[in-house]
Image (cartoon, rainbow, N blue to C red):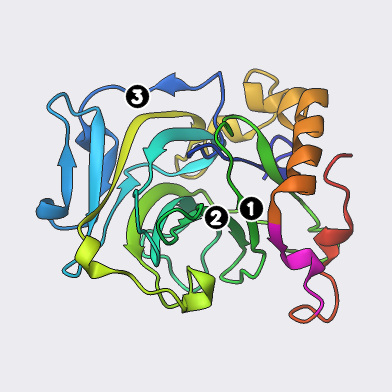
Amino acid sequence: MERNMGDLLLFAALVATLFSSSHAQLIKGAFENTFSKSCPGTHFKTSQDGQIWYLTLDQVSDCGFITKQSYRFGWFSTKLKLVGGDSAGVVTAFYMCSEVEAGPLRDEIDFEFLGNRTGQPYLIQTNVYNNGSGGREMRHLLWFFVDKVPIRVYKNANHTNNFFPAERPMYVFSSIWNADNWATRGGLDKINWTSAPFVASYKEFTLDACQWKDPFPACVSTTTQHWWDQYNAWHLSSKQKIDYAWVQRNFVVYDYCQDSVRNRYKPQECWLSPLD
């Protein structure tokens, strides 16, 4: 990836937004113009005007969707209403992946909302995969207003450990699925199927991104003509740094960089300051 957006990944989560930006243009029209669904028709519905999408999980099937186009980098967002009530074991994900079938050598950037028992808060888990390897999980508690607040910065340490998803274009996915073997208290809390069906709803998907075109699109070059070519796209602003530090102090519940049991040697990117 070029210098633009190539040195760091900014994780800015809302309830829920992946890479939201004031530059993004609202995609209007039918769902089918932008996405393909990956579930039975019985598990995917839209509002009458096509602007709200409903994904259902039950014991028959999960449900998801994927953009028809892939992108080199950019800003992507949606407004996502998570499953209410007893959602233990249910994961609602909004993520990017380089391979449609999530193959063994994929690159991936994950936002996963981990359900919980009634009255307990959701956790948000972020992760990064490079060439099929992951293990870069962080988990945060959520609060009520989290729009456009950066919760994680993942810097490019390719010069030392070559672990940064910088080479492949990615598709945008979302899904609701059964992850009760690990998602809630390490798999101790299973899905209560008497509460099914579980429904997540989406609206106002936006994107402002460099769409992939073979052999490569003109927008991957640094021309200073796009917002991603500008300095402000490569760094947190002063306010964002303050917000980011506040999140780290108050809402982190797991950080792989601090897991000395799992990682005998701290990964190289963990030594880089996210605020520089």
- Per the model, the C-alpha gap separating discs 2 and 3 is 28 Å
- Residue drawn at x 58%, y 45% as measured from the top left: 142
Q: Residues within 10 Å of mark 3 (few under 14, many from 20)?
A: some
Estimate the x, y position of residue 13 in percent, counting from the top left. 57, 40
Q: Are marks 1 and 2 in contact (CB under 8 Å)?
A: yes
- Residue drawn at x 53%, y 76% as measured from the top left: 186
- Return the disc, 3 or 1, that comes first in the chain's sequence: 3
The image quadrant that residue 195 belongs to is: bottom left
Q: Secondary structure at mark 3?
A: loop
- Per the model, the C-alpha gap separating discs 3 and 1 is 29 Å
- Per the model, the C-alpha gap separating discs 1 and 2 is 6 Å
Q: Is residue 200 left or right of residue 104?
A: left
Residue 27: assigned label: 3
Q: Is residue 56 left or right of residue 118?
A: left
Q: Which residue is mark 1?
A: 140
Say which of 186 and 25 sits in front.
186
- Return the disc, 1 or 2, that comes first in the chain's sequence: 2
Q: Which residue is mark 2?
A: 123
- Work out whether residue 127 can be spotted: yes
In the image, residue 74 sits, relative to residue 88, either above or below, namely above
Q: Amino acid at mark 3?
A: Ile
Quadrant location, the C terminus: top right
- In this view, which residue lies farthest toward the front? 119
